[in-house]
Image: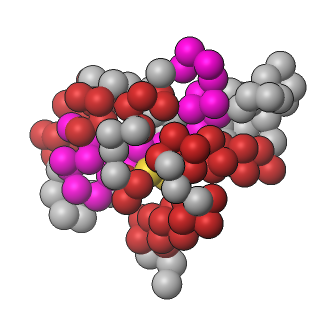
Amino acid sequence: NEAIEIVEKINDECLSGVFHCFTGDVGDAKRITDLGNFYLGIGGVLTFKNGGVDKTIEQIDLKHVMLETDSPYLTPTPFRGKRNESKYILNIAEKLAEVKGVSLEKIAEITNKNASNLFNIF
């Protein structure tokens, strides 16, 4: 909450970023998405049985989601206990597709667009 409060105070149209390793609730997510140019960094915790991120993400538009691995930590299920690697981003994307009820291709399309927008890659 502290980080959100700070960004809320200084936010303007030039400020953008990712709330890394987002694990907050729906209220936190909506405060972040209301900032305009910020994304929720969604990683391996999404795949955890009791992580809770899945319940939050169900209620958030994909245009606010950035996939991340947080390597070498927070390895997604079913690889927990092993060192996290970038290649496991697919497992996170698959879980996100399941949670949102859309295809993996749709997840790739939207999250690639989000990354392009954030990093000005066109």
Q: Residue furthest bottom?
A: 122
* Horizontal side, residue 44 vs residue 25: left or right: right
Which range of residues does the magenta coloring cover? 31-51
Q: Quadrant of residue 77?
A: top right
Relative vertical location of residue 116 with respect to residue 53 in this rendering, above or below: below
Q: Quadrant of residue 118?
A: bottom left
Q: Residue furthest front?
A: 101
Residue at the image point whose x is 19% and y is 47% from the top: 34
Q: Residue 96: horizontal and vertical position, in percent?
A: 56, 45
Residue at the image point whose x is 27% and y is 23% from the top: 1
Residue at the image point whose x is 72% and y is 44% from the top: 91
Residue at the image point whose x is 58% and y is 44% from the top: 98
Relative vertical location of residue 101 with respect to residue 75 in this rendering, above or below: below
* Horizontal side, residue 47 vs residue 76: left or right: left
Q: Quadrant of residue 27?
A: top left
Q: Is residue 119 visible?
A: no
Q: Residue furthest right?
A: 82
